[in-house]
């Protein structure tokens, strides 16, 4: 899908780049606190704003980072899987 970033999708106004930012991935856990948030990593995005209506758009800077999730190794069985699972798909260990 080819998206033009010079025109706003809402009002067809001019989009202006306001820079890049790293967005933190993950979530706050009751027992782990911010640890799971830190382990999830981040996603670097280019931020554009419409000069007409103020709509903000985010575009991934690294195409491969968009398709790959951070991996975690299960402490029980050693199986490596996507970080966003609440438990190991192999041994069902809960994090």
Image (cartoon, helix red, strand yellow):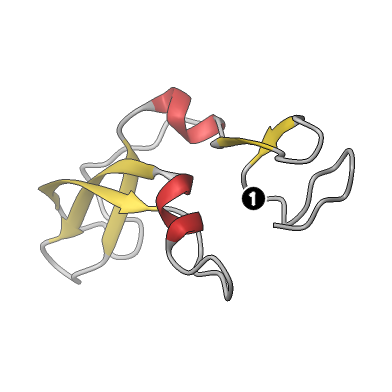
Task: Look at 29% across and 43% down and name the residue there.
Answer: 45
Q: Residue furthest right?
A: 91
**Place of residue 82 in the rendered image (x, y in percent of width and height, measured from the top left):** 66, 38
Q: Residue furthest front?
A: 76
Q: Nearer the viewer, residue 63 or 34?
A: 34
Secondary structure at badge 1 equals loop
Q: Is residue 53 above or below residue 5?
A: below
- For disc 1, the neighbor class at 10 Å (few under 14, some 14 to 19, many from 20) is some
Q: Which residue is mark 1?
A: 84
Q: Nearer the viewer, residue 68 or 11?
A: 68
Q: Nearer the viewer, residue 51 or 11?
A: 51
The answer to whether 57 appears left or right of 50 in the picture is right
Q: Nearer the viewer, residue 82 or 51?
A: 82
Number of residue marks: 1
**Place of residue 53 in the rendered image (x, y in percent of width and height, measured from the top left):** 19, 71
Q: Is residue 28 above or below residue 71?
A: below
Task: Look at 51% across and 64% down and name the residue there.
Answer: 27
**Place of residue 39 in the rendered image (x, y in percent of width and height, measured from the top left):** 46, 46
Q: Residue furthest top?
A: 64
The answer to whether 48 appears left or right of 30 in the picture is left
Task: Look at 18% across and 58% down and name the residue there.
Answer: 49
| Residue 72: quarter of image | top right
Looking at the figure, which quarter contains the C terminus?
A: bottom right
């Amino acid at each position: 899908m080819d998206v033009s970033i010079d025109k706003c999708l809402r009002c067809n106004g001019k989009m202006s780049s306001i820079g890049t930012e790293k967005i933190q991935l993950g979530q706050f856990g009751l027992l782990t606190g911010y640890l799971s948030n830190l382990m999830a990593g981040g996603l670097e995005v280019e931020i554009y704003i419409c000069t007409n209506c103020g709509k903000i758009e985010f575009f991934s800077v690294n195409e491969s980072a968009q398709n790959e999730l951070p991996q975690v190794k299960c402490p029980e069985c050693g199986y490596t899987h996507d970080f966003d699972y609440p438990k190991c798909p192999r041994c069902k260990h809960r994090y």
